[in-house]
Every structure is written in C-alpha cells, then in structure tokens.
Image (cartoon, rainbow, N blue to C red):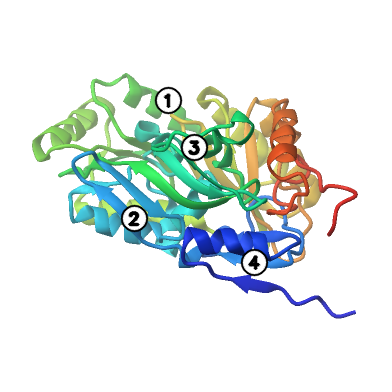
Amino acid sequence: MSTPAVTTVTPTTVDELRDAVLDHPGTLRVAGAGTAADWAGTPAPADTVLDVTGLSGIVTHNPGDMTVEVRAGTPFAALQDELAQHHQRVAVDPARAAEGATLGGLFATADSGPRSLQYGSLRDLVIGATVVLPDGTTARSGGHVIKNVAGYDLTKVLHGAHGTLAVIAGLVLRLHPAPRSTPTVAVPTDRAGMADVARRVADSPVEAVAVQWHADQLLVLFEGSDEGADTRARKLVETVGGEVLSPDDATSAWDAHGAAVRARPEGRAVLRLGVIPAALPGVLDGLEADAGGLTDVTASPRTGIATVALPADADLVAAAHRRISEAGGTSTLRQRPDGASLPAFGPAPASAVLLRAVAASLDPEQRLGRGRLAPWIPEPTGVSA
C-alpha cells in the first residue's frame, strides 16, 4: 500500500498560518530548520506539514525599551546579528544556533545554553507571543491584554511543548546589552572533581555567567566591561587556579563544547537531563556504570544540566530515564539512530495529569504534533488519524 502524500504549506504571515490550519483538515506537524527533528517522541505521520520558516524577520525592535518582536521562523543566529548592530542581544546561547535553528524551534524544544546560569532560558526572556490554536484561533499574550483560552498563560505552556498544543507564530523578547568583554577561565579537572571546583568558583568573590565542564576542564565565562570582567577572571585564577584563555583559545574551547552538545555519534542515543546540582555527579556516575561508558559528556555542575551519549539500547535508555527520574530530575531523548525504537522520556511526573488536561482543552483531537509527547500525552482514540 502506498504512503499517502503529505502536503507542505509555507505561510509567510500570521493570517496565512491561520488559514492553513483552518483549510487543511486532519493532523498537522510543525517544521522549522529541522535541527531537532529527532528530539522527543517520534511524530506520527501527519496529513499536512506547516513549514514556519516562511515566518521570518523582525517585526518591531525597540532599542530604548530593549524589546524585540520576531517571527518564529527567524534563524536565531540571524536575529543576534541584527541586534548586535545596536549592541544588544537575546541572552541565551543554544548550541543549535550554529546549525541554523529558528527562534520558534528553540522555544518549542526548551533549548538553552551555558548562559542559562545567569539569564535563564527563553521561557524567562519571552514576554509575549502570537500563536495559532488547532481550531484556527489566533491568540496573543504579553503586550496585549487578552483572555487566553481556558485561562492559560499560553507562552509558558508552549515552552518545551515540541510543536504540540499550538503553532508559535511570533515571540516578543526582553533584550540585554552586549558585553564589551567576555573572558573565559579554564580550570583543569576530571569529571570526579568538577563539582568541587565549581563549588569553589561559586564561593569565590566573583560572578560568572556560565560554568560548564567538558573535556577535562571547567570553563568559567565572565561578562562586563573590559576592566571589570578581566579583573574578575584574574581574581578567579588567583583563588581557584587555572588560566585566563586567550580570545582564540576561549572561542575554540566554547566551540568544542557546543559541538559536543550537538554531537550525534553513530549508533548512540543522546539524552539531555536535568537534576538538582548536588545530584548530578552521582547520576552521571550511575549512568556510566549502567551503560559501560558515556561519550560526548557536557555538564553544568551549577545548574545540574548535562548532555550524554550512551548505547542505543531500549532497555538501557529506559533505565537511564528511570535513574534520572528517581533523582528527582527529567530527561529527554535527543537522538535515536535510524529505526531504533527508544523511549523519549522517563516515567510521567505528577504534572503529566495537568499536561493532559491542557492538551484535552487546547487540542482535543491532537491535531498538532501527535506522538511528540507520547506517552505522557497518549495518542487519542476515537478521532480521525
């Protein structure tokens, strides 16, 4: 039996996006740059693909208010380049930006980066959104006073929803000034010692915007004026050790870190996990013992977030999810080798009940992204495929 043809629609305005949702019955899948196409659950076959890369560009930039409204299909790197002309930026640094990831895709996957230690994630920087619901309703939050459907804060609900519940058309973001200086201190340490070194960094009289472990060194990033940031970096070296990297070496070290976060090693499953910082070393040790070895490990001992690659075995991946859940954390599958059937998430948290209630309210037929959040949101029964 032949596979039914899939229609791809590329709207360029919010009205066209709304019309596409209304005019194409059946299931829908939102697509952007494709940099996270294999993250989370495997999407069920969709009748129509909504390619949001046509929704691109800055709508309004208010440099004085330090806010910007951007269409969701805008490549994040291009947005940063535009803002840099005004010495401003969105203060997140996801590794996928180097691959052309869009703003909407980063928000939908709850992706962030090392600077989340200081600035939080996009959830913390987005102050408004324009979305299209599965019934074709266009809703705006943030700068506009509206009565959201069922009273939900749609912006927060859609962060990390992986293209389910609603289609993100545009976002309004809070901006930060671009720093004049960004020195990096590298402190040699193996993974066993990273927590202790990170604790000494936290106890020192300096403030870092990012602390990440990778390739047997702890990278500590500072931001500020030429004199202020450089002084703090040198003071940390005096207190903790290590060295202030040259600009070229710092760029290489952070590029290598980003490459490890983005890595898709052949025949391996990649997990992104988050636990309380105190639990991170024990969780990583347990995962390594279970898997017989981890690769492409990056970890933030200050935030408890890590990325690891392990053998693509379904039982092993399920056990890894359980171990992380038992430590009070969460984990998401970020890569599965072609054809591998691997669990995308761990045991459903208590909040999954609320998630299902929100899904039942916003998208009762599960038109959008069916399968992406399975089994936390199971595929519906008694509705059209």
In the rendered image, which residue does mark 4 sit on? 49
Residue furthest to the left: 227
In the rendered image, which residue does mark 1 sit on? 196
Instruction: Pick the quarter of the image with the N terminus.
Output: bottom right
* Residue at the image position 73 percent from the left and 54 percent from the top: 367
**Nearer-the-camera pick, 30 or 323:** 30
* Residues at marks 2 and 3, CA–CA distance in whole angstroms: 44 Å
Of pointers 2 and 3, the one earlier in the residue sequence: 2
* Residue at the image position 51 percent from the left and 54 percent from the top: 105
Name the amino acid type tagged 4. Val
Of pointers 4 and 2, the one earlier in the residue sequence: 4
Asked whether, in this view, residue 118 is left or right of residue 311, the answer is left
Percent x, y of residue 330: 63, 34
Name the amino acid type tagged 1. Asp
User: Which of the numbered marks, if any, corresponds to residue 191?
Assistant: 3
* Residue at the image position 39 percent from the left and 23 percent from the top: 199
* Residue at the image position 62 percent from the left and 32 percent from the top: 283
Name the amino acid type tagged 2. Val
Q: Nearer the viewer, mark 1 or mark 2?
A: 2
Name the amino acid type tagged 3. Arg
Can I make out residue 351 in this image?
yes
In the rendered image, which residue does mark 2 sit on? 59
**Nearer-the-camera pick, 160 or 137:** 137
Dots 2, 3 in contact, CB < 8 A: no
Callout 4: helix, strand or loop? Answer: strand
Callout 3: helix, strand or loop? Answer: helix
* Residues at marks 4 and 3, CA–CA distance in whole angstroms: 43 Å
Of pointers 1 and 4, the one earlier in the residue sequence: 4
Residue 357 lies in quadrant: top right
Q: Nearer the viewer, mark 4 or mark 3?
A: 4
Percent x, y of residue 211: 37, 36
